[in-house]
Amino acid sequence: GSGSMAVFGLLAVVAALQAMLVPIVTGYVNRRTPSAQRATVLSAQSLVRGLCFAPLGPAVGAIADARGVEWGFGLLGVVLAVGGAAVWPLWLRAHRRTLTRRPPLPAERGEGERGRAEGEPEMPRREEPRLPR
């Protein structure tokens, strides 16, 4: 009936939220993770997300088969709300801690003005290819 149609509309909302959330989370990680560790952090984030949602899919499907689609999505909403409420204080504490630390200046990292270590030779500049006239 009309409840089933509302659930299918909810699917579109969930897909849109996920499509918006992934670039936001990726940008957040990119701004706060050193480039040498960024790929590892993004990979771990993707793995954790997959490990969290892998058991939810079959569980939601089984409940939807047994009790109806509304029950399946209702359970999913409850699990995500409880999980989010449990993780929120941890994320907030880590976020605040990163805001209070400023990144070290090049001189504090032992680097010269141009971002290379003292005494390190400057890399030769690559000539840009020129088109024949």
Image (cartoon, grey):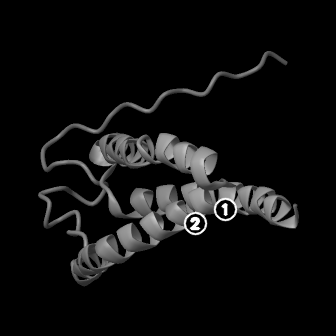
Look at the image and tell me in which quarter the C terminus lies. Answer: top right
Label 2: which secondary element: helix
The residue sitting at the top extreme is 132
- Report the residue that reaches farthest toward the front: 66
Examine the image and state in which quarter residue 111 appears. Answer: bottom left
Contact (Cβ within 8 Å) of mark 1 with mark 2? yes
- Most foreground residue, 104 or 122: 104
Q: Left of 112 or right of it: where is 32?
A: right
- Which residue does the numbered mark 1 point to in the structure image? 70
Residue 77's spot in the image, x, y percent?
53, 67
Report x, y in % for residue 105.
Answer: 23, 69
Taking the spot 44% from the left edge, 33% from the top edge, the residue there is: 125
Q: Which residue is mark 2?
A: 74
The vertical placement of 96 against 48, above or below, is below
The three-letter code of the residue at mark 2 reads: Gly
Q: Residue at x 23, y 84 (%)?
A: 100
Q: Secondary structure at mark 1?
A: helix
| Three-letter code, disc 1 | Glu
Work out whether residue 117 or residue 22 is closer to the camera in this orientation and state it: 22
Residue 19, given in percent of the width and then of the height, sits at 66, 54
The quarter of the picture where residue 37 lies is top left
Q: Is residue 61 left or right of residue 79?
A: right
Q: Is residue 31 above or below residue 100?
A: above
Total marks drawn? Answer: 2
Disc ID at residue 37 = none
Give the camera-side residue of 28 and 109. Answer: 28
Q: CA distance from mark 1 to mark 2?
A: 6 Å
